[in-house]
Amino acid sequence: MSRPVRIAVVGHAFMGAAHIHAWRTAPRFFDLPRHPEVAVLVGRDEARTRAAADRLGIAEIETDWRAAVAREDVDVVDICTPGNTHAAIAEAALAAGKHVLCEKPLANSVAEAESMAAAAEEAAARGVRTFCGFSYRRTPALTLARTLVEDGRLGEIRHVRAQYLQDWLSDADAPLNWRLDRETAGSGALGDIGAHSVDAAQWVLGDSIAGVSALLHTFVPTRPVSGDAQGLGGSGDASGERGPVTVDDAAAFTARFAGGAVGVFEATRYALGRRNANRLEINGSRGSLAFDFERMNELEFFDGDDPTAEQGFRTIHVTDADHPYAGNWWPAGHGLGYGDLFVHQVADVVAALDGGEPVRPDFREALGVQRVLHAVETSAADASRFTPVA
Amino acid sequence: MSRPVRIAVVGHAFMGAAHIHAWRTAPRFFDLPRHPEVAVLVGRDEARTRAAADRLGIAEIETDWRAAVAREDVDVVDICTPGNTHAAIAEAALAAGKHVLCEKPLANSVAEAESMAAAAEEAAARGVRTFCGFSYRRTPALTLARTLVEDGRLGEIRHVRAQYLQDWLSDADAPLNWRLDRETAGSGALGDIGAHSVDAAQWVLGDSIAGVSALLHTFVPTRPVSGDAQGLGGSGDASGERGPVTVDDAAAFTARFAGGAVGVFEATRYALGRRNANRLEINGSRGSLAFDFERMNELEFFDGDDPTAEQGFRTIHVTDADHPYAGNWWPAGHGLGYGDLFVHQVADVVAALDGGEPVRPDFREALGVQRVLHAVETSAADASRFTPVA
Amino acid sequence: MSRPVRIAVVGHAFMGAAHIHAWRTAPRFFDLPRHPEVAVLVGRDEARTRAAADRLGIAEIETDWRAAVAREDVDVVDICTPGNTHAAIAEAALAAGKHVLCEKPLANSVAEAESMAAAAEEAAARGVRTFCGFSYRRTPALTLARTLVEDGRLGEIRHVRAQYLQDWLSDADAPLNWRLDRETAGSGALGDIGAHSVDAAQWVLGDSIAGVSALLHTFVPTRPVSGDAQGLGGSGDASGERGPVTVDDAAAFTARFAGGAVGVFEATRYALGRRNANRLEINGSRGSLAFDFERMNELEFFDGDDPTAEQGFRTIHVTDADHPYAGNWWPAGHGLGYGDLFVHQVADVVAALDGGEPVRPDFREALGVQRVLHAVETSAADASRFTPVA
Amino acid sequence: MSRPVRIAVVGHAFMGAAHIHAWRTAPRFFDLPRHPEVAVLVGRDEARTRAAADRLGIAEIETDWRAAVAREDVDVVDICTPGNTHAAIAEAALAAGKHVLCEKPLANSVAEAESMAAAAEEAAARGVRTFCGFSYRRTPALTLARTLVEDGRLGEIRHVRAQYLQDWLSDADAPLNWRLDRETAGSGALGDIGAHSVDAAQWVLGDSIAGVSALLHTFVPTRPVSGDAQGLGGSGDASGERGPVTVDDAAAFTARFAGGAVGVFEATRYALGRRNANRLEINGSRGSLAFDFERMNELEFFDGDDPTAEQGFRTIHVTDADHPYAGNWWPAGHGLGYGDLFVHQVADVVAALDGGEPVRPDFREALGVQRVLHAVETSAADASRFTPVA
């Protein structure tokens, strides 16, 4: 049997837990060339990292990521920390010859992302792979969407409307956290969730955004510095000290794609009642698609080639054996969940090692998303003027 | 019994037919102070106007609107013609002391709309009323939406997303018609359907758009000059002569409301599969609403005051006896149709005559919509730069 | 021009108003061979009948239906009264040579229905037509459903599940009314709404129910004799006198169709929250259909011939120009309402006079529904034993 | 640290894989008193069992379940084999002092189920626990449904309609498999999926079915003996030998609950397009609920206490931190999948060991489901006559 793929996971919050679950589950449902094993969990605080490792079933920990990426027994470094740490960790790992899976957005600035992409290209020449964790691409419904577009079933694409709507900041007294701090998170709704929309739209269309006209807004400029976190939000101490929110609460922009489509994008964490509505709707000359992650097992497809009297959006339950990824799981109709996307992601990553088919997006492609985010911020700062993606 | 209200209807296409059906039906379901009667139908072509009058059950016709608005026996002039004719007809009618119901958009330019609003104000002093036909306001679900916002059930409004999606131009060979001609229609998707979104959003919020950043686009610059019309679109003669489309095919813009909300608007006639998706979604600090005219009898309402574990968007079937307008029709659950909105509209108009409660929007309020459309065109022509609504 | 069709409408409550609206509207939207006119409205109470006639715009009234059906100037008798009066009025009208449109269910017993069907057959020999008002057949979506089944698009039919769910009796103190009285209404949910399901299922399938196994139940055996009616239900005087409910509150039965399909039927007025959910779902070997009248403009169609990865229920918005009836109304996507079904019904009736294509269901076909209802009651009274439809 | 819970899993097909995934995942997301470990996998065929164990990451195998249940190092026997083997394995395991988790339906006959329940009761006196794998109870949405009913939010329950619709037998040439063999499976759709509906309805209502009137039907009496399995169905060799289907293809029955509610149940594997529509709808005097497993993260709740004008079915996305089970997983709106239900199930099982709160259903409660299935078969064989549940 081939030797295992050994992974160092950096970070053990929401994303770290999701990735570790995935590394453990993937070999049980997917036929992988090598067996992945999480070798070490990395966190700054020893006690908390040890507790997380125990809960997640990982034997070893490191409190210094530099030590982790230097370990002989590590093949892949999986970065699940905030965006301000990505460049340093990723570049050190690449220099040490490790494959890197890095959470999105790739970095907090275009400059960092460019540096990472350059390092990735240099490493690629040595057979080292990079991946950026735009996990929604691993939703079977979105993968099917991409296939339909690629096969020309939508014809010429005219419209894209992408909304990523959450509501965990609706309460003006939800507490501050790192996602509201520009230094750590880079941006707010834009980079946290809008980045997913940009990536998904460009990927499904096989096209890129040429320019944008954007608006950023912060509804609640200060929030309690302490409180009880719950999920992403929680309940802050309304009567206590407040600190500044230094990122956007909402981003909205129109876009022109290189291929001629018109896009409308919106990202917010104030859409009360929309817990995680990552929506994508595409209209072409031959067909249309609609997707909402709150119903992640479904894809709506309108086939303009159907006879007029029989046309309608079809709700495809994307759980059949011949749908992407789905055949590895349960019988048709037995849906998948959010956590399963990460299983798909790491299965794809493992398959890409050792000369396998590269998995998109690599750092180069993720840099493209970063450039769109940058154009959005530039336009928003310039009275929404149309700004080409550099 | 009080003397009837006598109406001259100008125009007998889609809109004219809808209005005439409404004038006839309203007194059968609504308790009106006076009985409306369509006294005369006005059209330029005598034979076609006569045929329409016969079909629609109207005894008299006129081929010159000037004669019609001058008739002693006419109380209300109901204008159902393209936008380029509105100002002349409306102003003549007001000068003759007739109440005026004018289809939307009010005019093809802000200048015309201002002139009409001025004439309306002058006439109002003489007890003459004006109305602009933003008929979607008469949807029970949207009226309920406005009530919920007015009652504070949504709290502070943060987000508006309004889409008006149709698809009758998806076929690049659908024929030219007056709606694609700038001279006649003023604009394309923007004024035809985007105007409805602007009006509905401003009305439901009780707020106004302060500025916009916009993009206009024409996907198909030329179309067959002849062909078979069907519905709004049809099948053009693809091998024959083509003429220019001089209006926008699609409009997209971000907006800032005076009260602080962020808006995203989109209007298109290229959203294949969306036959008439007039959608409005609003998120506030206490609640949210969602509406799609393709399910016109339903309003989605999310009440943030519900206990967390029981929160969800409620699908309210807006057909109960205590819903707006609905009690005049059928038992609960027996839905209304598009044509019934016009019945509500004329019932409101009749109730407003003779010193009744004014009905919104009057020309002054409709001018406000026109100003937003103008700002959209200005911004689109200026690289999407943020443009205040003058 | 051909002479008008003159109609006597008997009854002026919910159904009478709906029919009269339809007679008036049909010639404005449908191209009819003759022009219908409601000549006379018939009601027992002179003052109330006069008031209704005034509101509905009918010049003449009669308080004795015998006088009305004898009038020389009446061509069609339109019966909108409770079931216990149908046989007498219809048979007198047929004897007088009038065409008859009779509300459903055809009668309160099989014996009456058989007598009516016999009279109808005798009259048919004289060119006199009968129709039974199963108006839901006129829903464009259900007409399309029938076409799809007829064209073999569903293949061999295996399953029918039909539910007619209302909720106006959910409140145990809603007042008694004629629909709760066996003498007047014949039965409860079974005949009032279950009859629609039976008719729709048999018609869409082109098949007939061979036998049933049934359960009838009355949840609330007594109700206030007085109270405020609202819609179909209302608010009874809870502290006052109560009278007996003598009909079923709910009916549920399994069925076997002659062609081999298995059916499950349910009718109730206690399904809280389902205002008027007239649902029909059909599964065949090649395709499936689903319909819910609360979304009357939509038909769900699953085409088993689609490639597996693209299969899904399509939501067809049945408002296109080439859908049944829809082309006579508005552009695509501008939905119809409940009242419009009656317009379709009378348009079909007028087209069927004077040797036109017969319109289904006639009395003979409606008798078939009555026989199913009878088998349901027989089975329910015999411990749900399977009971063939005689 | 406490010693682990060691499990023997018997069976390694669809259900075995689901259970093993769950045993491995549960301790990573749930705070369990002891750590579960799958000690041994049991299968009849050594090579296939070894291959499955390798894939699923289990070190040891046994080919004789008798050896497995006798092992000293096993605490729990988890039975994932067809129904005809349940009684023997479970009773041996209980005799050996092992806790038993047994897949549903508990057995293939009431006699076997009674024997198992008796053995369970005898073992319970020794502190040994039994569980039956009605896994749908672990859906957060259905758990929430039960809480709402238990809290009286639905008032007096009037209606239950439960449908379990699949379509993997729609193709008349799908191949024979053990689920179509009476000897192995006990019954067809009835026991395979109808059992889930019976259990869910009784559990959510906190009530039991008093009697039924039933119909069973087999649409396709013979099927190819060989072919390519895919999911549950597949593609049979249409030109080859056919063998008999000895179970029901579809079951439909009406039911009366002890508490007065009327139920309508249907189970089929011929509902083309319904991949796994496990639906439950409940109407009470104060509220209503609707659930469809194809949207397993959603529960529809109608609260009759809402003001009339605001009433509607709420779509609750049952993924909030304060929803059952959900808080252990992801942030709100990030849905769960089918596989996650089994994680909930084993987490509940582990929590119930060592004197924890008993987990329902135990064998006694599962016997109740078996008795309903038996009454259904008895009624179906007796012309659908109403048959009390013995």
Image (cartoon, coloured by chain):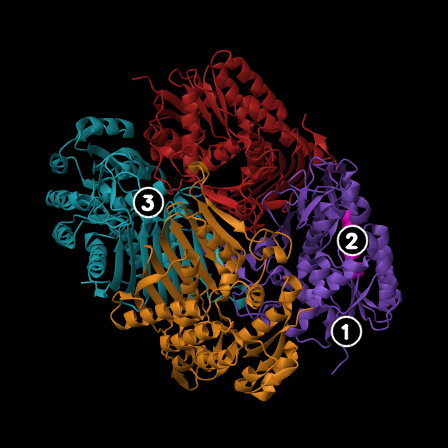
Chain colours: A cyan, B orange, C purple, D red
The relative height of residue D312 versus residue A110 in the rendered view (above or below) is: above
Provide the residue designation for mark 2.
Answer: C82
Q: Mark 1 lies on which chain?
A: C
Discs 2/3, front: 2
Q: Does residue C320 belong to the magenta stretch?
A: no
Judge from the rendering whether residue D119 lies leftward or rightward of residue A255; answer left or right: right
Q: Do labels 2 and 3 share a chain?
A: no
Q: What stretch is highlighted in magenta?
A: C362-373
Judge from the rendering whether residue D61 lies leftward or rightward of residue A215; answer left or right: right
Judging from the image, what secondary structure is the residue with disc 2 in? loop
Discs 1/3, front: 1
Q: How many labels does the image show?
A: 3
Q: Does the rendering let one see residue D52?
A: no
C-alpha separation, residue under disc 1 versus residue under disc 3: 69 Å
The amino acid at mark 3 is His
Q: Does residue C369 belong to the magenta stretch?
A: yes
Mark 2–mark 3 CB contact (< 8 Å): no
Q: Nearer the viewer, residue A236 or B171?
A: A236
Q: Dividing the image into 4 quarters, which one contains the N terminus of chain D?
A: top left
Q: Residue at x 16, y 45 (%)?
A: A183
**Mark seen at residue A344:** 3
Q: Residue at x 20, y 49 (%)?
A: A106
Judge from the rendering whether residue C220 lies leftward or rightward of residue D152; answer left or right: right
The relative height of residue A44 versus residue C210 in the rendered view (above or below) is: above
The amino acid at mark 2 is Pro
The amino acid at mark 1 is Val
Earlier-in-chain disc, 1 versus 2: 1
Q: Residue at x 44, y 56 (%)?
A: A300
Tell me the crowding category of disc 3: few under 14, some 14 to 19, or many 20 or more residues within 10 angstroms, Cα based.
many
Provide the residue designation for mark 1.
Answer: C5
